[in-house]
C-alpha cells in the first residue's frame, strides 16, 4: 500500500472514531490531539482498527510513532507494504 492510500485509511478510521470532526483542514505535520478532540480511548481505537483491518501489531512503546499523520504514514508504510490498496 502506498503512502497516499495509507493516509486515506487513517482518515477513514478517524472519521469513524470522531464523526463530528472536520478533517478537511487536517495538518499532516501537527499532532492529532492538537487538532481534534481525541482522548486516549480514541487513540486506542485507532490502534485497534489498524489491528483489526490490516493485522498490524503496534507495540505500546511505538505509539509515539502515531502522533501526526506524517509520522503515522511513515511508520505504517513498511508494515503495510504488501497490502494491496482498497483492502
Image: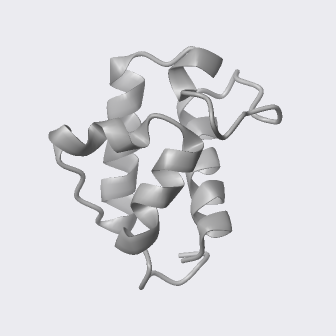
- In this picture, is 29 found above or below 8? above
- Where residue 87 sits in the image (x, y, percent)? 53, 76
Left or right, 85 with respect to 39, comes to right
- Where residue 10 sits in the image (x, y, percent)? 56, 50
Q: How many labels were placed on the picture?
A: 0
- In this picture, is 73 found above or below 84? above
Where, by quadrant of the figure, is residue 35 drawn? Answer: top right
Name the residue: 37% across, 44% down. Answer: 65
- Where residue 15 sits in the image (x, y, percent)? 64, 37
- In this picture, is 29 found above or below 31? below
> Which quarter of the figure is the N terminus placed in?
bottom right
- In this picture, is 48 found above or below 40? below
Name the residue: 59% across, 26% down. Answer: 18
Image coloring type: one colour
Name the residue: 35% across, 70% down. Answer: 79
The answer to whether residue 36 of the structure is visible from this angle is no
Name the residue: 17% across, 48% down. Answer: 59
Depth order, front residue of 13/78 = 78
- Where residue 47 sits in the image (x, y, percent)? 34, 44
Outermost residue on the front side: it is 29
Where, by quadrant of the figure, is residue 80 drawn? Answer: bottom left
The answer to whether residue 22 of the structure is visible from this angle is yes
Where, by quadrant of the figure, is residue 61 drawn? Answer: top left
Left or right, 41 with respect to 24, comes to left
Amino acid at each position: 500500500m502506498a503512502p497516499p492510500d495509507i493516509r486515506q485509511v487513517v482518515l477513514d478510521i478517524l472519521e469513524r472514531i470522531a464523526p463530528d470532526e472536520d478533517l478537511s483542514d487536517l495538518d499532516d505535520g501537527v499532532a492529532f490531539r492538537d487538532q481534534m478532540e481525541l482522548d486516549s480511548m480514541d487513540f486506542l481505537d485507532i490502534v485497534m482498527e489498524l489491528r483489526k483491518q490490516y493485522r498490524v501489531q503496534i507495540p505500546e512503546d511505538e505509539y509515539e510513532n502515531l502522533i501526526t499523520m506524517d509520522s503515522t504514514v511513515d511508520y505504517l508504510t513498511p508494515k503495510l507494504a504488501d497490502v494491496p490498496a482498497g483492502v
